[in-house]
């Protein structure tokens, strides 16, 4: 059974790139949850999923401890691996994502934080971006990745990308909870796709056409924007409240507004039908993330 969406969503988007300071990310997440955030999204860019497992595992632990949701953007199999509540997919698939990425990490010789060679990398070079150092919490042991068998067959794990969603994506779990293993669970016998594993599935949208298409694919929510001007997209015009109202009235899917959202504007967004808001810099870059989160939470009526 899928987790329920909060009646009022306060989502914190946490970017994760090769330049990320992981310790700061974890501190911000914990403080924001204490301030009223009820959903964390790890937004991964320019890193393979094999280098993001540890931070995703710790964020999942932090979210659970605070009775909040946790989603991974954009890797479905990584979301399944860490037991996330959901997976979020972009409107268009980034070029760096391929339909499947085989993992070749050794269970005995390499932990999750290692750098297994990905398909398409030359054998002697093409190093993946360095994995950020992650200070794990006490007792928070990470599971190593599964390894191929001696022949190299039967153990090459395919990590499906968001391109497979809506095309019968079957991310199955092995008895060892591998990333995209080949043993079907009861859920995958009953249906294919990410939804068969009870993940909340969301998509980012910037147009009515995309929203209608994803509605036909039965997504659970849409992240819509950007609503107001934002430094993240300085060259793109803001969509505005009238556009958001039109989207809400036309497409019957819960919509979470994103882009340039301040606590003072939350009331306007709720008035036109938004289910809640997604925030990045307003909380993550605040001097005190907990206080900033509390301000948003009060505006949403969560406190």
Image (spheres, rainbow, N blue to C red):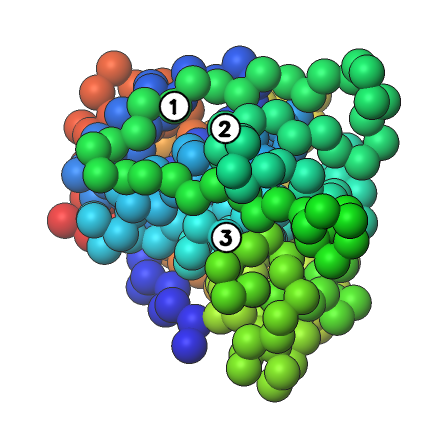
Residue at horizontal 61 percent and vertical 26 percent from the top:
115
Name the side, left or right, on which 283 lies relative to 212: left
- Give yes or no for contact between labels 2 and 3 (Cβ–Cβ under 8 Å): no
Comes first in the chain, label 2 or label 1: 2
Q: What residue is pinned by disc 1?
A: 134
Label 1 SS = loop
Q: Do the residues labelled 2 and 1 touch (CB within 8 Å)?
A: yes
Q: Left or right: 123 with respect to 236?
A: right
Q: Position of residue 136 (x, y in %)?
A: 30, 29
Q: Are marks 3 and 1 in contact (CB under 8 Å)?
A: no
Q: Helix, strand, or loop for circle 3?
A: helix
Rendered-image quadrant of the N terminus: bottom left
In the rendered view, tell whether residue 90 sits above or below residue 15: below
Identity of the residue drawn at 51% across and 46% down: 72
Residue 203, position in %: x, y? 61, 53
Residue 14 at what x, y percent from top left?
Answer: 44, 32
Q: What is the x, y in percent for residue 86?
A: 48, 57
Q: Who's the residue at 53% across and 31% down the image?
A: 110
Viewer-proximal residue, 123 or 94? 123
The alpha-carbon separation of the residues under discs 2 and 3 comes to 14 Å
- How busy is the neighbourhood of tag 1: few (under 14 within 10 Å), some, or many (20 plus)? some
Viewer-nearest of labels 2 and 1? 2
Q: Along the line of sight, which residue is nearer the eye, 114 or 165?
A: 114
Residue located beneath label 2 in the image: 113
Residue 104 occupies quadrant: top right
* Residue nearest the viewer, comparing 259 with 43: 43
Disc number at residue 81? 3
């Amino acid at each position: 059974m899928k987790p329920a969406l909060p009646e009022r969503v306060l989502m914190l988007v946490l970017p994760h790139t090769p330049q990320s300071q992981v310790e700061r990310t974890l501190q911000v997440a914990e403080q924001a949850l204490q301030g009223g955030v009820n959903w964390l999204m790890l937004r991964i860019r320019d890193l393979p999923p094999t280098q993001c497992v540890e931070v995703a595992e710790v964020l999942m632990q932090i979210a659970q401890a605070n009775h909040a949701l946790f989603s991974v953007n954009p890797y479905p199999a990584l979301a399944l691996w860490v037991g996330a509540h959901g997976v979020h997919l972009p409107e268009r698939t980034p070029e760096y994502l391929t339909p499947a990425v085989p993992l070749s990490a050794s269970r005995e010789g390499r932990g999750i934080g290692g750098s297994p060679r990905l398909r398409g990398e030359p054998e002697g070079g093409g190093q993946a971006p360095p994995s950020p150092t992650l200070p794990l919490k006490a007792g928070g042991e990470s599971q190593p990745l599964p390894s191929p068998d001696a022949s190299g067959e039967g153990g090459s794990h395919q990590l499906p990308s968001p391109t497979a969603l809506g095309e019968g994506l079957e991310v199955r779990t092995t008895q060892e909870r591998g990333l995209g293993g080949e043993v079907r669970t009861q859920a995958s016998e009953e249906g294919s796709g990410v939804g068969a594993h009870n993940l909340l599935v969301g998509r980012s949208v910037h147009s009515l056409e995309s929203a209608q298409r994803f509605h036909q694919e039965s997504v659970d929510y849409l992240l819509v924007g950007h609503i107001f001007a934002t430094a993240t997209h300085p060259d793109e015009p803001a969509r505005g409240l009238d556009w958001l109202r039109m989207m809400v009235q036309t497409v019957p899917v819960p919509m979470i507004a994103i882009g340039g959202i301040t606590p003072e504007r939350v009331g306007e967004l709720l008035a036109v039908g938004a289910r809640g808001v997604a925030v990045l810099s307003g909380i993550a870059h605040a001097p005190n993330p907990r206080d900033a989160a509390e301000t948003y939470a009060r505006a949403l009526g969560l406190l």
